[in-house]
Amino acid sequence: MCGGAFGAALKFAGIDGLALTGAATEPSVLVLDASAGAPGLVRVEVAPAADLWGLDTQQTQAALHARYGDAAQIACIGPAGERRVRYATITHGTRTASRCGVGTVMGSKNLKAVVVIPPRRRLEAARPGEFEAEVSAHYERMKVHPRFANLRLAGTLPMTEKVHYLGMLPVKNFQTATLDGLENLYTDAFHALKTGNHACWGCATRCGQVHHVRFGPFAGEWSEGPEYESVWALGPEVGVVDPAAIIAADHLCDRLGLDTISTGVSIGFLFELAQRGLLAGPTAEAVADLDLTWGASDTVLELIRRIAYREGIGDLLAEGTRRAAETLGGDTSHYAMHVKGLELPAYDPRGAKAHGVGYAVSNIGGSHMYGYARQEISAYKEPRPLDAKTDTDKGDVIAWNQIRKAVEETLILCNFADTAMDLPFLAATLRAATGLDELGDLDHLLLLGERIVTLERRFNVREGFSRKNDVLPDRMVTEALVDAGPNTGEFIREMDTIVDEYYAALGYDADGRPTPATLARLGLDSAAKS
């Protein structure tokens, strides 16, 4: 998922979805030119891009804008994607599609960028009057909602203080939940560096926070961000409490095309191995020139560069924590903070059990966005309230969160632009936009969400995944949280029980496989044969 205007440009060009198969024989750019304006007419060109190979994401976009004009919308990869770093990103403007290695896939296809040149025409809703009425009513609700003003003022930056207060801020590779100097990363510190806001296409929220560093060793650095996850991953996760250093690291990740979460967790993994004396032989030699103590911001920046270019120890970290631990062997896997190979985000699972176990059963691994448990983190009451510390009776809510998120993402709904939105509004707007009455039925929408989650699970089962993969790192079930305020002493006590509850809610068997009855109920009988 990526913000900006690229998706809108695709839609204006008459393209609802773009699937790319195979690979180019040489570095290439895919150009989709709909500027002629005729409905459905798109000129497709695969252009050579040897001259772009090696450029960072900002240099690439500048070169392509010079070639195709300012109206062109561009999605590209940086050096990390070219070298198939496992967590490379796709960048559009200053926004990124970051998790799960989507940029790695583009690199494997020798695809440096996709360029869309949209036509100069508007799209019409199937029922324009109904659509305009729904959108206008929502905008009036949104304008008076406090979250709207808060997101424009600070984006997600207040989450650093909030999650720390809740006792679930991961620090130093999930060893503890507090850090000296953490107040330097609260909202006011970044607000002093803020120079503007940035918005995605058509968005009134404008939650993007632009920061510039004016003084000190990082003077001149800037970032359209960092948001909470990046502040955490390039800050407390690696022991850094300097906002200027985090801004510099965030911008470097964006330019080189790296997911900040996986990058920070991979560096935190290395720092903890050094802390525990688990680096030896050639690995120790590869880091001999680096200061691997917590908070070494210069080392963090250098490791970001080495990861992107797969230099030295960067080549190992570019594989992610799971594969790095498999290569290193010994006890190192205990310190690899991932689920299904995807590094964990900025909420310690021990502090909010539904949110945390949601990582374990997520079909894509350690993603906080696959089924964000707002019931525990923000006291949401849908579908029912939850106590974050409770160890059971949560599996059905985890399933509900995943289904709801599948619906929202199918509607291309930004998590930060959903202020004052609810399912009835989404259903009514979708019906007005498409003219399809069934999409205005809430039960039908939720059925579609459940189909998506179940199809993904069926795909994973086909590829060999089972209950053995629906697990959290050992640390979460064997080590209690320390220095975690209200969550001190917490750990995941009833992992198997919550997973069983989740399977039961979705109609899976004890090994996490959708049953034939479930597939039939969802109209997915054909998936049982694949």
Image (spheres, grey):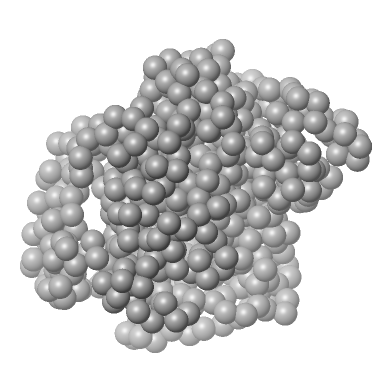
| In the image, residue 22 above or below residue 113 | below
| In the image, residue 235 above or below residue 40 | above
Of residues 84 and 155, the one nearer the viewer is 84
Instruction: List x then y, in percent, for residue 93.
Output: 50, 54
The part of the image, by quadrant, that contains residue 147 is top left
Of residues 246 and 321, the one nearer the viewer is 321
Instruction: List x then y, in percent, for residue 466.
Output: 52, 59
Quadrant of the image containing the N terminus:
bottom left
Q: Residue at x 66, y 35 (%)?
A: 335
Q: Residue at x 67, y 47 (%)?
A: 322
Which residue is most to the top?
180
| In the image, residue 416 above or below residue 144 | below
| In the image, residue 59 above or below residue 182 | below
Q: Is residue 142 visible?
A: yes
Of residues 382 and 191, the one nearer the viewer is 382
In the rendered structure, the answer to whether residue 374 lies left or right of residue 318 reads left
Q: Residue at x 67, y 78 (%)?
A: 24
Q: Is residue 209 visible?
A: no
The part of the image, by quadrant, that contains residue 300 is top right
Q: Residue at x 18, y 54 (%)?
A: 423
Of residues 116 and 18, the one nearer the viewer is 18
